[in-house]
Every structure is written in C-alpha cells, then in structure tokens.
C-alpha cells in the first residue's frame, strides 16, 4: 500500500502484519537509535502517546519533528504534557492552511486524496502507541 489512509481503510487487515515506513520519519528514528525508548505517532494516537509518557513518569523526553506536520504535532504534545489547553480545531485549521503541506491538498494529485487530511487529523482515533523494538543481531 502507499502512504494514503484512504487506501488503508479499504483493506482487510485482519491477521496481517504491517510494516510502517515514511521517508523522513524513518530517518528520524534511525538517527535516534541511542535513545532508551523510541515511540512514534501522530494526531490519531496523540492521547495514547501522552498517557504512555505520563504513566511512565519519564524524567526526560525528547520530541523530534521531521516536517511541518510533525512540528505542529510536537507543539501539541508539549502543550498537552505541560497540562496546557489545546485547541484541536485551531490545529486542524493551522495544518490545512500551512503552505508546507499545500502539495498534499492539491486536488490535481489523485495519489493524495483530500479525505486523507481528515483521516490524519482524526484526533485519538486509535488507543495504542507505535514503539520501536530494538533487536540484537548474532
């Protein structure tokens, strides 16, 4: 499958293993390989990430953003972790109007259906975190 949520929702994923890949996100995870724990996510898993961090009472958390959407998500995480109010509608408007994601909103690019933006901004759609598990090779 490609990088389109609307493509994924049409697919039966029962009993399937998924491998998640992004260009910039993967590079960020590789560059953070010495971190004690690596988790990643987006607005659809935001509250699960916040809950995970709060439940583990980490003394130090680094939030790494790789692009404009990640930067806005990082600000959302930071505000939420500090107990500050977050305005989800304002975040949606900020992302939709940001020139950095204009290519994603271009109706002339069928590989990026406009509905994908709605999927990407569906706050707390999932109650899980994505965690990188390190393996040692023999």
Image (spheres, grey):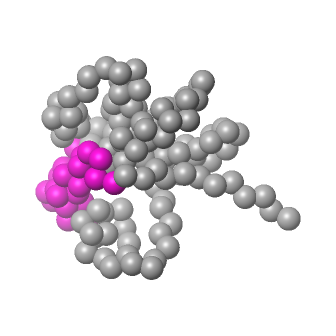
Rendered residue at 21%/34% (across/down): 88
- Regarding residue 24, the answer to whether it shows in the image is no
Q: Quadrant of the N terminus?
A: bottom left
Which residue is nearer to you in this view: 5 or 80? 80
Q: Position of residue 121 (x, y in %)?
A: 24, 46
Whole-percent x, y for residue 51 in the image: 43, 38
Residue 35, image x and y in percent?
Answer: 66, 38
Q: Main secondary structure of the magenta part?
A: loop
Residue 34 in the figure: left or right of residue 73: right
Quadrant location, the C terminus:
bottom right
- Residue 104 lies in the magenta-colored region: yes
Q: Residue at x 35, y 21 (%)?
A: 83
Task: Please provide percent x and percent y for residue 31.
Answer: 63, 42
Residue 110: image quadrant is: bottom left
Task: Name the one closer to the observer, 83 or 26.
Answer: 83
Seen at 54% across and 51% down, the residue is: 131
Considering every residue shown, the one lying at the far right of the view is 138
Q: Which residues are magenta?
A: 102-126
- Answer left or right for 99 relative to 76: left
In this rendering, is residue 63 above or below 127?
A: above
75 shown above or below 19: above
């Amino acid at each position: 499958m490609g990088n389109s949520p609307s493509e994924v929702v049409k697919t039966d994923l029962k009993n399937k293993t998924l491998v998640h890949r992004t260009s910039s996100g993967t590079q960020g995870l590789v560059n953070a390989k010495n971190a004690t724990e690596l988790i990643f996510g987006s607005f659809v898993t935001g509250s699960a990430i916040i809950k995970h961090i709060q439940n583990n009472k980490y003394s130090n958390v680094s939030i790494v953003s790789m692009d404009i959407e990640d930067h806005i998500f990082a600000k959302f995480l930071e505000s939420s972790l500090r107990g500050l109010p977050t305005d989800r509608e304002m975040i949606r408007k900020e992302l939709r109007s940001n020139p950095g994601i204009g290519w994603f909103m271009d109706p002339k690019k069928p590989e990026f259906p406009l509905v994908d933006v709605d999927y990407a901004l569906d706050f707390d759609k999932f109650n899980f975190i994505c965690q990188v598990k390190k393996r040692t090779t023999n």
